[in-house]
Image: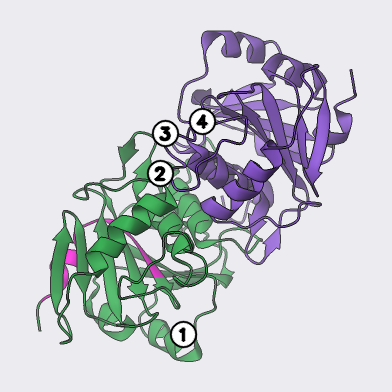
Chain colours: A purple, B green
């Protein structure tokens, strides 16, 4: 089984999205990202939120999409903000690039891995294997979580960390159990329940300011 | 000249996006939102950030897009989170709804206004007329702005307020002068330069928590 470290330890900031319905086989319909593609619109917005700045990229960040939809799950799609090329912020172009990558054959064996485009890696791994392979605090973003308290200040001392979010569906009980064994903490970002890409933008902001006393 | 108050005072939270290139005449190409449509992808993401929660809408918020692109500018497209129907969060569906609305004829006289779909209003007004018509603090979000300091706490006492952002282009000198006469303050949200939809998500978050001391 190949080592996943080259993907999972490439960046300091990591966002992990559990995409329950998102097509894993490249059968992404660019004119119907929401429906037949399994909410690839939301996946694409999360990629944009994770990696884009105005006229620049977040080079310290990777986003990992755990694709659980048909017809070839599980697959982990990792995009590295330092190395990725040809990525645009709009849903159609971003999904088109990922569609092309997902059309490349990936071995069925656990840990099989290919890099079909610069900065993009596909790995044959599910949530359990992913959780076993990361090194660094895992923070679950969840509406039932606690206030972040000192979290964002303490993360400023960490070499590497992972924020995990579900897509528009709740985590299953089985997924929750897997995560609980590994999770550093479970927090919510404000009182409202948000789309994944909004939570990602807010987490980046709180990391950027380190909850700067001038702002708080 | 009709009164704009029904549009500009409908919501407590207001986001105003100056969209310099976005097509104002409904010639929006759903397969090319970025290019020929004049960055309608970004406009759509800003609408989504302003109005959507997970499985709900922000009913206290309106977003106003000042369309300055060809071929029928200026037009103010206002979407009211309390009243809007048929709006989806993805770029293609959101742009398709707005395209349909923009195809409806709007009078050339200043202040001409139509409501082509529930919760959506088109008004013939430019930045100067818009600024003359608002009542409540105007906050410019800009990379050269100050730290927000106490702003989000003080806004919790205001009946109504407006956050103004430019799209991916800088405000022109003429626009800056118009805004300066009206602006309450100019702030930045963190040290990085962000896409409009990210800044909107962060502003909502800071309003939601009122910079809750438990978080800061």
State whether residue A142 is above or below residue A13. above
With respect to residue A143, does A88 lie above or below? below
Q: Which mark is residue A193?
A: 3
Residue B109 visible in image: yes
The region drawn magenta spans B3-17
Any mark on residue B176, and which?
1
What residue is disc 2 on? B208
Discs 1, 2: same chain: yes
Residue A179 in the image, given as x and y percentages of width and height: 65, 15
Tag 1 secondary structure: helix
Q: Nearer the viewer, mark 1 or mark 4?
A: 4
Which label belongs to residue B6?
none
Q: At 68% from the left edge and 37% from the top edge, which residue is drawn?
A: A103
Which labelled disc corresponds to residue A167? 4
Q: Secondary structure at mark 4?
A: loop
**Which mark is in front, 2 or 3?**
3
Q: Chain of mark 3?
A: A
Q: How many marks?
A: 4
Task: Estimate how packed mark 4 is, as few (under 14), some (14 to 19) or many (20 or more) residues with alpha carbons within 10 Å.
Answer: many
Q: CA distance from mark 3 to mark 4?
A: 12 Å
Q: What is the crowding at mark 2: few (fewer than 14 residues within 10 Å), some, or many (at least 20)?
A: some
Q: In terms of image quadrants, where is residue B21?
A: bottom left
Q: Are marks 4 and 2 on the same chain?
A: no
Residue ID at (17%, 77%): B106
Q: Spatial distance from mark 1 to mark 2, Cα to Cα?
A: 29 Å
- The chain letter under disc 4 is A
Instruction: Report x, y in % for residue B23.
Output: 38, 74
Residue A150, picture quadrant: top right
């Amino acid at each position: 089984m190949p080592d996943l470290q080259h993907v999972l330890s490439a960046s300091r900031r990591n966002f992990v999205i559990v995409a329950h319905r998102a097509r894993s086989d490249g059968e992404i319909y660019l004119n119907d990202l929401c429906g037949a593609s399994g909410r690839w619109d939301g996946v694409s917005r999360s990629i944009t939120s994770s990696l884009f700045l105005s006229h620049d990229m977040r080079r310290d960040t990777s986003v990992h999409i755990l694709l659980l939809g048909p017809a070839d799950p599980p697959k982990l799609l990792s995009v590295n903000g330092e190395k990725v090329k040809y990525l645009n912020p709009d849903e159609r172009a971003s999904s088109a690039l990922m569609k092309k990558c997902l059309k490349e054959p990936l071995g069925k064996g656990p840990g099989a891995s290919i890099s079909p485009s610069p900065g993009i890696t596909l790995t044959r791994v599910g949530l359990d294997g992913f959780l076993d392979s990361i090194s660094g605090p895992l923070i679950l973003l969840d509406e039932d979580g606690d206030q972040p308290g000192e979290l964002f200040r303490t993360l400023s001392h960490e070499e590497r960390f992972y924020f995990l979010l579900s897509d528009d569906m709740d985590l299953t009980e089985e997924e929750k159990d897997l995560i609980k064994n590994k999770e550093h903490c479970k927090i919510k970002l404000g009182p409202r329940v948000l789309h994944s890409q909004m939570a990602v933008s807010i987490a980046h902001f709180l990391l950027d300011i380190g909850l700067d006393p001038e702002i708080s």
